[in-house]
Amino acid sequence: MWHRLSNPFLRLNQRQGSLTSKGFKAVRAHRLHTGSAELTYSCYDGLYPGHIQTTSFQKALLAVGSGVAALQNPYRHDMVAVLGETTGHLALLNLRDRMRNDPEGYTILTERPRIRLSTLDLENMASLPDGSFGREYLRFLEDNKVTPDSRAEVKFVDNEELAYIMLRYREVHDLLHTLLGMPTNMLGEVAVKWFEAAQTGLPMCALGAVLGPLRLNSSRLESLFTSLGPWALQNGRRARCVLCIFYERRWEQSLEDLRQELNIEPPPVILRASNKRNT
Amino acid sequence: MAASLRLLVRRLARLSHRSITSAAANVSWRSGCCLCPSSSRCLSDAAEDRSTHFGFETVSEAEKAKRVYKVFENVAQKYDIMNDAMSLGVHRLWKDMLLHAMHPQPGARLLDVAGGTGDISFRFLDYVYYQQERQKRRATGSSQSLSWQDISDKYPDEDRPQESRAVVCDINKEMLKVGKQRAESMGIISGVSWVVGDAEELPFDDDQFDIYTIAFGIRNVTHINQALQEAFRVLKPGGRFMCLEFSKVTNPILASLYDAYSFQVIPVLGEVIAGDWKSYQYLVESIRKFPDQEEFKGMIEDAGFCCVQYFNFTGGVVALHSGFKL
């Protein structure tokens, strides 16, 4: 009886082992012929660069482990990312349908734009007038000392298109900060998480929205529950899908104009970008 | 000096053998003989052409060393935490059992290859210190009925205790760095040296050490036989070779549980704790590729060691191989 029970595990492991070796062998053979001794883990055996095949058991373990790790140390962005990937399958399917039904969203799915420092024309954006989306985004990056290149890559989503949507969601997160006028301190992040939870339905956002406030002091908690929180939730529900906007073509558009188009009200409280570790 | 000369001679011999065989192959090719043209490639012996395993992947030998280096560079900071998490602390028992089997006496010189973060060396120093204390106590205990003058004469020399020394040798500088930091935090200032070196080509003279250990490192070496030969070379006659390594589990139930745990849980732990799935995937795969207890025993005997035996720990999950240079 034990033997029969243990068989599925063995088969799973052997299959995983052979999957890995097959995929690697194919790329490896090519590498040997070209004689390149390149040494990163860039050869991949999955559906996209960085993809790691996982069983449902492993995904469940990852979800629990990354959740605990992210709670213990909220600055571990890679753990937040893993939590999002392992729990977000249904929400990603939902997002994909919404993007496909929206004309601009569909363009994004076909063109697959990426927001990275290498693709942004920083000089051009700096020369835009104040109040324009591009200028305000740049100001946000400078004030909070963040860069769009610090996003973790997607690893555990088993569908290439959904993996792109997850990546797009991460890259759009900073733009959301600009749109909502929230800095990157704990209160601002929680407010953005409430908005994202209402918008995307990703369990990771919901979890962050529920557990994030635990780290806030009482005055900020009050501000969250009385003004910022309800504003974020309402706007999250009624706003247009934020992933469906082709931001890269809208740098010159005025921020107010973009907010109106997306159906987002300006924030009720102006928060300053202070020291990141101030809660 | 003798070591490097010998290495040079060996290399020259290999080179000349290579040139002879490739010359022979060329001659036969030119003479129109239908030898498959790839035979000259096989004989030319370049490390880029020979392949070996890196986990379940097949790579060229030159690349394996680089990739193994990268793996341990990535995991060095979290290495000790991960060991505790993956083995639930049992690795400490395995290493303690290695020390008990070793039973080093004060004055012994240890070479800890692939010693990285220093686990074995620290235990060695503790063990030897404890042995020294016991001997001191016995010596003073036996001189109870003597006069004060005689007792102070017999008292063991305080300023020249028997010098036991451990040398930690590792190819990876990051691992050595972590080991040094641990030594500092534990307050160990003397008795350990940290040397960067390749197990296949140790930077030591012949007949230097009483004990050679390699704990959980030999499966990462590209040419295990060369590492064994180097071990034979640097040990003094009468010296002991001890190798702690993951091995084959014989019990089928335990084996399937162990496999399931290795492939399902360990990479997840690697991702959550160290942020590195692929390195830990490599580590569990490399365990499967390592020869089993009997085969490894044969390899140790081939290198010249005598009285080779092995002990299984935890049902064969870990095996301790021991041999003597006589």
Image (tube, coloured by chain):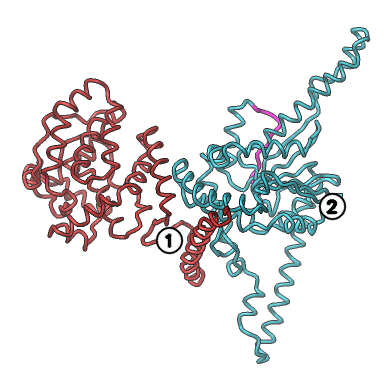
Q: Residues within 10 Å of mark 1 (few under 14, many from 20)?
A: some
The chain coloured cyan carries which letter? B
Corner quadrant of residue A79: top left
| Magenta stretch, residue numbers | B188-198
Residue at the spot 12% in from the left edge and 52% down from the top edge: A250
Instruction: Left or right? Give the position of A231 relative to B313.
Output: left
What amino acid is found at the position of numbered circle 1 in the picture?
Answer: Tyr
Instruction: Left or right? Give the position of B299 relative to A212.
Output: right
Give the residue furthest to the front.
A1
Is B250 magenta? The answer is no
Q: Nearer the viewer, residue B156 or A111?
A: A111
Q: Chain of mark 2?
A: B
User: Do marks 2 and 1 both belong to one polypeptide chain?
Assistant: no
Q: Is residue B18 above or below residue A54?
A: below
Residue B179 screen position, x and y as percent? 60, 36
Residue at the spot 44% in from the left edge and 42% down from the top edge: B272
Corner quadrant of residue A228: top left
What amino acid is found at the position of numbered circle 2 in the picture?
Answer: Cys
Judging from the image, what secondary structure is the residue with disc 2 in? strand
Give the residue pinned by disc 2.
B306
Q: Residues within 10 Å of mark 2 (few under 14, many from 20)?
A: some
Judging from the image, what secondary structure is the residue with disc 1 in? loop
Give the residue pinned by disc 1.
A44
Q: Is residue A58 above or below residue A71?
A: below
Q: Which colour denotes chain A?
A: red
Residue A176 screen position, x and y as percent? 19, 43
Residue A97 screen position, x and y as percent? 19, 57
Is B197 magenta? The answer is yes
